[in-house]
Amino acid sequence: ELASKNASKDLATRVLPRLCAHGVPGPNTLEVLTRMLADGACPERFALRYAYYLMHRILEHYGRAGLGTNETVKAATSQCIKTLGEEANIRAGVRRMLATRALVAAARAGVPEAAGALHRGTVGAIESLSAGEHPRGKSGMFDSKTGKTEGGDAAHTDAAARAALGARRRFIAGSEEGDKNADSAVPSPSALAAAVASPDHVAARHALSLALAAAKGPRYEELAIALEPVIGAVAKRMEARAANLEAAAAAGNSKEAKAMARKSEGKQKGEPNLDDPGAEPLFLRLCGALRARLLGAAERGGAPHDCAWACEKVLDAELKTYGGAAAGSESSPRVAMAACAGLFGSDAPSGADGAKARAAAWQAIVRGGGEGGEPRLLANS
């Protein structure tokens, strides 16, 4: 028994760290690493973490060509992909996330069966989000006794959504523009609308990134309809925030006035989760992309869309708030730059549709029609 404990300790503290430090192991190690994931096969959690990492590196490094050299390696790779797919579907917490990351690396490297396993491992969480469900996190073997996990409080960590959305975001990021497989990886507008309000701030950031990708695609109008309540809630709060800061500045720019202005701001029901530092810039870029595409469609004879007006309000309020930084604004330059980029439609897609969207966004700025430079077709909305 003592020898067994010492072997586990050596594996976690000496053998696997040295393997990681000396490059990528050969494909013939996949069989051993896959067996380590079985229940009870490896009680040392840090050894398991190394096993996931090494599988990720092997699948990513060798890809389809390197893992198809002989029948033994092919069989080990197939079993590895099957096991990772099961892990992505049934495991809790960090193990689920690590399994999906390895599958993404394999799918991007062209490993056979990886893309299908990735889809099967994440589709359950996406379907739950489409139904408007936000499952709370379950504790896993990597979580501490205090309820903390790698992303924060386990009560606000949705490992399934974080893993599924993060996996699909990474898969899209590694694909060529216009790739049909990448387009199919984008969740439905209803799933994205639910996911951006996830209590897990990392999952919400992944959802905003995917929504930005969807705003460049053919289903942008469906996305606008799904996100209109979400964007409208943010617009209402940001307009109130800008008004409060202006009132604080008019009251003499005192610390007490600024504090009262910020205290009176309440988060609106249905708002997205923007707690992650990268979430707010993504949200503003998303508003800009949707606004530009909807304005471009309206210029071609379509009806004006309420979502475009809500996006305009959000961008305008953010720029006003940043412009009043001396009056106590907490907006960062990164957020203000995202609002500027959004106002000009910088995230509209390439091609003719994107060019028309950016032209419509520019026309909305130069011709005005109301406060904030909204286009005339929205001025009386």
Image (cartoon, grey):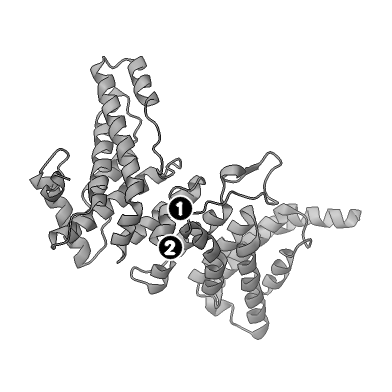
Residue 380 image position (x, y, % from top left)? 14, 44
Of residue 363 and residue 226, the one placed in the foreground of this image is: 226
Per the rendering, the mark at residue 187 is 2
- For the point 26% across and 28% down, the residue is 243
How far apart marks 2 and 1 lie (CA) works out to 10 Å
Name which residue lies at 37% across and 29% down: 265
The amino acid type of the residue labelled 1 equals Ala
Query: Label 1: which residue?
Result: 195
In the rendered image of this protein, does residue 150 appear above or below residue 212? above
Q: What element carries label 2?
A: loop
Q: In which quarter of the image is residue 97?
A: bottom right
Q: In this view, does 53 lie above or below 265?
A: below
Q: Which of 57 and 152 is in front in this view?
A: 152
Label 1 SS: helix
Q: Quadrant of residue 271?
A: top left
Residue drawn at x 23%, y 58% is 293
Between 29 and 136, the one nearer to me in the picture: 136
Classify the position of the N terminus by image quarter. Answer: bottom right
Contact? badges 2 and 1 (CB < 8 Å): yes
Which quadrant holds the C terminus?
Answer: top left
* Furthest residue in direction left, as rendered: 367
Residue depicted at x 46% and y 65%: 171
Give percent across and percent down for residue 146: 68, 38
Choose the circle earlier in sequence order: 2 or 1. Answer: 2
Three-letter residue code for mark 2 = Pro
Residue 348 horizontal/vertical position (percent): 25, 58
**Vertical position of residue 118 compared to residue 313: above or below:** below
Residue 41 left/right relative to 62: right
